Structures are given as structure tokens and as C-alpha cells.
Image: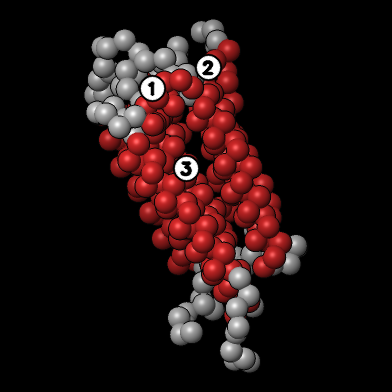
């Protein structure tokens, strides 16, 4: 059996995702866990490129890999010492976590393998920037103007909330 | 549609990612690692949305926009969560889940 280039890329990306998502949650150095998370997110962007969603891959790279991971690294550096080792997980937590994960994975994968997915027979829509922009701003039956507005209000609220929560207020002396 | 790659393979990869996020959420006791586990979970869900859109409903863009909105919600959630974590750190000087058990102002 000959492996095509796209299959090779798929196996490469999925092994990166699998290995580094496990390392993200098992690594005891928290800064290293953040870097592993970055690898997972970049590999996900690779999946999006493979699926031909270039815009979504760009958003993933900019917002997740560029924004959220940097934010997480900053907060790690602000709140914990750089070579802090996380304590070992308690046995009860470890057992229950692995049990939940394995059971959930077994159920989901059997469900995925058994379900007969049916693809639509309509011709595929080209996903270019023009189509995305038109649909995002449209108010008709295919439009997503309302979710777009709602999400912009949500982002504004989150931004103001984050500033108000994190700013140094007049704190009562408690200690 | 990707040649030679069944849709179920990608779904299995994203399932693995989702449940490693769930597992990390349970076994870790640090607020920032909890946040990272949530990011893993949201990311796995995003992969699923885009894969379903590409393979099953390639004549529409619904999964694409839903994934876009999930990314925006994740960004907002990360910003607020990190603001909260920094505030908690200032008040309790650590960010372990057990030590932050009182909500009294």
C-alpha cells in the first residue's frame, strides 16, 4: 500500500496531537505544559489547512497560538516560580480521571464507528474569503449577522470585565 | 474532502484530544492547568465542527461559523479567567484549587 503525501501529513499531525495533548496534562513543569499546548494548537491549525479552511487556520494560529498561549505563559510567569514542579496528582484523582477518560473515549469511539454518516450530494461551496465575509455580514436566511454582533458584544464585555477584575483596586488589608 | 483519509480517523483523533482534556481537568489542581485543559476540550470540539462541515455538509458553512464563534468565546473566557487567576493570586498568593475555597470578599 502506497502512502500519499496527504496521508503522511495526516498521520504526522495526528501523532503530534495525540502525543502532545497527553504531555500537556501529564507534564509537571507548567511552563513546559503551555509549550506542549502550543504544539497541539499549531497541529490543529495544520488539520484546518488540510481541510481547506484557510481562514479558520489563520484564526487558529493568530488567536490560539498567538494570543491565548501567550496570555497563559504570561500568567504562569506572573503567578508561579519558573521551575516550580506541580505536585503529583493524588491517587484517587488520577484513577478517576483516567477512568472517566477511558470510558468516555470507548463510548464515543464505538458510537463514531457505528454511526452511518451520510454526506450531502450537493456540490461543495468554495470557501474563500468572499463567501465567508458575505455570509458573516448577511442578514438573510444564510446570514450570520446576529451571532457576529452578539459575539462582538461578548468580547467587549469580557474585555471590560477582565480589566476591572485584574486592576489593582483599593484592597482592604486582610493580612 | 480529503482523499484517502476517512472522516472517522479525524473524529477519533479529536475524541482523544477531548478526553485528554477531561482527564487533565480532573487530575490537575492548578488553575492554569485547568484552563489549559479547557482549551484542549474547546479545540477538539472545533475540529469536530469543521470536519463535519467539510465531509458531510460541504455545501454550507455552518460548522465554519460555529467554530469561529467558539474561538471567540474561548478567547473571552481565557482573558476573564486569567484576570481572575491574577486577582486570586494577589489575594491568596497561590493558585491551587484547594487553597482557594472561600469566596468571601
Q: Residues within 10 Å of mark 2 (few under 14, many from 20)?
A: some
3 and 1 marks in contact (CB < 8 Å): no
User: What distance separates the C-alpha of mark 2 from that of mark 3?
Assistant: 27 Å
Q: Label 3 belongs to which residue?
A: B71
User: What distance separates the C-alpha of mark 2 from that of mark 1?
Assistant: 17 Å
Q: Label 1 belongs to which residue?
A: B54
Left or right: B28 as drawn, with respect to B7: right
Q: Is residue A76 above or below residue A148?
A: below
Left or right: B27 as drawn, with respect to A171: left
Q: Residue at x 34, y 29 (%)?
A: A138
Q: Kindly state the secondary structure of the residue where label 3 is placed.
A: helix
Q: Nearer the viewer, mark 2 or mark 1?
A: 1
* Residue A52 in picture, x, y percent from top left: 49, 20
* Residue B27 in picture, x, y percent from top left: 50, 61
Q: Kindly state the secondary structure of the residue where label 2 is placed.
A: helix
Q: Answer yes or no: are tags 2 and 3 on the same subunit.
A: no
Q: Label 2 belongs to which residue?
A: A7
Q: Chain of mark 2?
A: A
Q: Answer yes or no: are tags 2 and 1 on the same subunit.
A: no
Q: Can the viewer see residue A148 in this picture?
A: yes
Q: Residue at x 26, y 12 (%)?
A: A121
* Residue A170 in picture, x, y percent from top left: 60, 83
Q: Chain of mark 1?
A: B
Q: Residue at x 35, y 36 (%)?
A: A145
- In this orientation, which residue lies closer to the viewer: A139 or B46? A139
- In this orientation, which residue lies closer to the viewer: A87 or B1? B1
Amino acid at each position: 500500500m502506497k502512502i500519499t503525501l496527504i496521508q503522511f501529513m495526516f498521520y504526522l499531525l495526528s501523532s503530534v496531537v495525540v502525543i502532545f495533548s497527553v504531555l500537556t496534562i501529564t507534564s509537571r513543569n507548567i511552563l513546559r505544559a503551555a509549550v506542549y499546548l502550543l504544539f497541539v494548537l499549531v497541529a490543529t491549525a495544520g488539520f484546518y489547512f488540510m481541510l481547506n479552511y484557510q481562514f479558520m487556520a489563520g484564526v487558529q494560529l493568530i488567536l490560539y497560538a498567538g494570543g491565548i498561549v501567550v496570555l497563559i505563559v504570561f500568567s504562569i510567569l506572573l503567578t508561579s516560580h519558573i521551575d516550580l514542579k506541580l505536585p503529583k496528582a493524588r491517587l484517587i484523582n488520577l484513577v478517576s480521571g483516567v477512568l472517566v477518560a477511558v470510558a468516555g473515549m470507548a463510548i464515543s469511539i464505538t458510537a463514531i464507528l457505528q454511526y452511518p454518516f451520510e454526506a450531502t450530494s450537493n456540490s461543495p461551496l468554495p470557501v474563500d474569503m468572499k463567501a465567508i465575509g458575505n455570509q458573516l455580514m448577511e442578514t438573510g436566511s444564510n446570514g450570520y449577522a446576529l451571532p457576529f454582533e452578539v459575539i462582538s458584544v461578548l468580547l467587549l464585555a469580557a474585555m471590560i470585565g477582565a480589566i476591572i477584575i485584574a486592576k489593582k483596586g483599593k484592597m482592604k488589608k486582610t493580612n | 474532502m480529503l482523499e484517502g483519509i476517512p472522516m472517522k480517523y479525524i473524529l477519533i483523533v479529536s475524541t482523544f484530544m477531548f478526553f485528554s482534556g477531561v482527564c487533565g481537568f480532573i487530575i490537575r489542581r492548578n488553575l492554569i492547568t485547568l484552563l489549559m485543559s479547557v482549551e484542549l476540550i474547546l479545540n477538539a470540539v472545533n475540529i469536530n465542527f469543521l470536519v463535519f462541515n467539510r465531509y458531510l455538509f460541504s455545501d454550507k458553512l455552518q460548522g465554519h461559523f460555529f467554530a469561529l464563534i467558539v474561538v471567540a468565546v474561548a478567547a473571552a473566557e481565557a482573558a476573564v479567567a486569567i484576570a481572575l487567576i491574577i486577582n486570586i493570586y494577589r489575594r491568596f498568593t497561590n493558585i491551587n484549587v484547594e487553597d482557594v475555597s472561600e469566596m468571601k470578599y
